[in-house]
Image (spheres, rainbow, N blue to C red):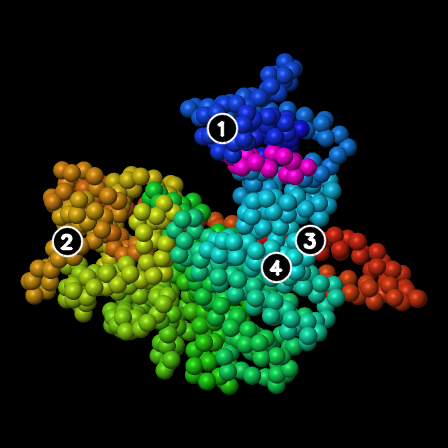
Amino acid sequence: MYLSLMNTYDMDFQPLPISAFDALMDVKFGGKESYGLALSHRRQKRDRQWETKLSAELKVLLNVSSRSGQGSNLRALSIINPLFAKEIFQHLKQEASTSSIMLQFLRSKVFKRQNGPVDQVIRVVKDVLKKREALENGRRQKFSRILTVIMSEEDTERAVSVLKKGFEMTEDPMIAQQIARLYIYSKNWGMATEYAIKATQLRPNNSYLWDTYGQVFKAQVFDQYESCITNQALSLEDTCNIIQVAMKGIEKFHKEQDQSQHDNKTSPNDPGYFGEVQLIILLMKVLNFSPFDKDVLHRFVVESTFEPPSLSVLDDGSRDTLKKLQGFTESAMRKIEERSSQLKENVTSSIFRDKKGFPDESLAVLRENVDMLFGECTDVVPSHLSPLESADFRRRRVKRLGGRSLSSLLRYLRQDNGNGSCLRQLEIMFSHLTMNISSACPEPFDTVMLISVALAMRIHSKKESVTTKIPNILDLTKRMYDTECKSENEFPYLEIFLYLVMFHWPTPSRKSKNICPVGTIREAIKRWKIAFQTNHPRQRDEGNPHRKKETTYFFLGKDHESDEIVYYEELHNRHGSMYFKGDEIWQDPNVVHKLQRLEGTLVGDGLEVLIRIETESGNKEALTVPTAMPIGQRSLWQKKVFFYLGFSWAGPKAFDVSSDDRQSLISNSIQSHDRMGMARIRSSSVLPDPTQRIEEIGRRLRKIEQLKKKRNRSKIEDNVIREENALRSKLKELLSTIEDMFGGT
């Protein structure tokens, strides 16, 4: 029975060592009992007659396997296939529950011994308790197969008892994590916290365990939100309590982020940032039901100096937490955005983003909610604000309009429906950012986004270059870079380095302009790489198997009217596929027409290109840029090569390095380059946030509860009451959507 139990619920259908069952069969040992695999193999004194007494009918249902060179001790048994295992288990267990049989097995004599075969069985037990099946939507089941069955056929408490016994046997922190998750599911917050603490104490450097700890508090905030929908009123005490619960969750997510950032042994774990933002969004939704006016609360959260008398009743801890929410959110959102846009999913993929293109739907949902909660809905800056507060107001307005980052602007362009609204929004952003730069309190964000907006406008309309839109672009990028060099910014904007190098890269047509000296470009490239590794610390170790490749948005082009800058989507054929594979794109005549083909010497064992640059005064300066891919063709080493210059998020890189100058393709490109243009695809619409619909249903249900208390009701009121079941069903459905968006574990 135990074999069929394990084979039924083990997703990997692993065989179990035969010798592990000796204790159940009362196998006797010659001399003293052996606990070591090697010793037991040498002595070979087991009297294992039970194997030979297996009936022929039973042997037909079993597979016997062994590990070569390890002897009979590691001969293992399994049912012939999972379907048979399931049927056999169902037949043998009869009226007994799955949990009772599992507990019986975990308490059996099998685990009274310590040896290799028993250790293997314990590993399988761990998998049975922890491993979750993948769903078609890319997510996983909430719990393992066996726990899902026990919870369905029995109850959560029985599932917890099985997990607790497993944890008692193994002290595996990942099983403690599953216990915490089960308690979250059953809303037993105290026990969930207890086991989350046990898990993190056993393995404090594991970011996934800290994520579960944070989920304990996020689930409590979501539970409060559900309660508010039907009960509405949130007392002052409840308001303070839920704020403090949220702060505890934020602290745990911060711990998760810190552990993940410096752990190169596991795949990148970004849920800590998502969890933090989701938690804050849920808290803000809950606070809509607090005793405080929504507009006053919004101002208190986003304006650092605003201290209304009505909020003085909050305790100091709650007030302090509310003042920190916007900063926490902006920091987490920026890291999510930049990791999503600046790093590729696959190290071996091409220069272009994978088919997902831009941040996925979950990020779009977060962005939309954050901008609604913390952004400003009007372009009119209130007159009572100080110059500093006015600049902050305009920044919040820009973000609300979609100007959160370069990648968010580019994503915005892809969703343009051609009615002119996109360009109008960009103009409004540009105006706000220009005012901030002209004010006495500009921030790096203002300059970065001003140039980003100008680039987006040039890409969108192709009518006005960035240098035309921002005549002082060279001076602006220099000042921005100089300011960054003097600052101690722990999370610098990589656009500062991108824009300096991209607009100041020495080309023949730029020699007469006030561009930076080559030495400044060389130093900026070094600082750029350091800044990239500061923002993405897991990228420092080139031997890290989880290291990702950075994306490339821009290339050095030929068109002076476009500032000699080409956005990568402008290389796509609008009548063909949007994405190119391998090196085929570099041989397209239209790409040859758009991009400058530079000359250099391949050095550093095919990893770098040395470029000789002649200054306006005739002096020769050298710049070295890494190749986008290692060049293994030794015949090119230390030889003249040609390449395209791309500006990745980690610095400039040489693409399509070869001895071919592609000149033979230029004649063809003259006739066909007009086919090229920015590729546009229809972006899938973001799932609508059902918050307003939920709150509307909540109001109707509360009204129904009031009507039910009336003795004399009209027919119209009775009809309203009859809608209750349908409304509650719809509410459950919508809350499930909200949970998927913000509250899932």
Q: Amino acid at mark 4?
A: Thr
Percent across and percent down for residue 658 are 18, 42
- Kindly report the distance in space between the C-alpha atoms of the residues bearing marks 2 and 3: 64 Å
Q: Quadrant of residue 113?
A: top right
- Residue that label 3 marks: 186
User: Looking at the image, do the residues carrying marks 2 and 4 touch, with CB atoms under 8 Å apart?
Assistant: no
Rendered residue at 84%/59% (across/down):
721
Magenta stretch?
A: 104-121
Of marks 4 and 3, which one's residue comes earlier in the chain? 3
Residue depicted at 17% across the width and 59% down the height: 507
Q: Main secondary structure of the magenta part?
A: helix
Q: Nearer the viewer, mark 3 or mark 1?
A: 1
Element carrying mark 3: loop
Local packing at callout 3 (Cα closer than 10 Å; few below 14, some 14-19, many 20+) is few
Please rate how many residues cluster around mark 4, counting C-alpha atoms within 10 Å: few if below 14, some from 14 to 19, many from 20.
many
Q: Amino acid at mark 1?
A: Ser
- SS of the residue under disc 4: helix
Badge nearest the viewer, 4 or 3:
4
Residue type, label 2:
Ile
Tell me, yes or no, whether the two marked residues, 2 and 3, touch with CB atoms within 8 Å: no
Residue 221 horizontal/vertical position (percent): 63, 63
Label 2 vs label 3, nearer the camera = 3
Frontmost of labels 1 and 2 is 1
Q: Nearer the viewer, mark 1 or mark 4?
A: 1
Q: Nearer the viewer, residue 292 or 476?
A: 292
Residue 250 location in percent, x, y? 53, 65
Residue under label 1: 40
Q: Earlier in the sequence, mark 3 or mark 1?
A: 1
Toward the right, the furthest residue is: 712
Distance CA(mark 1)–CA(mark 4): 44 Å
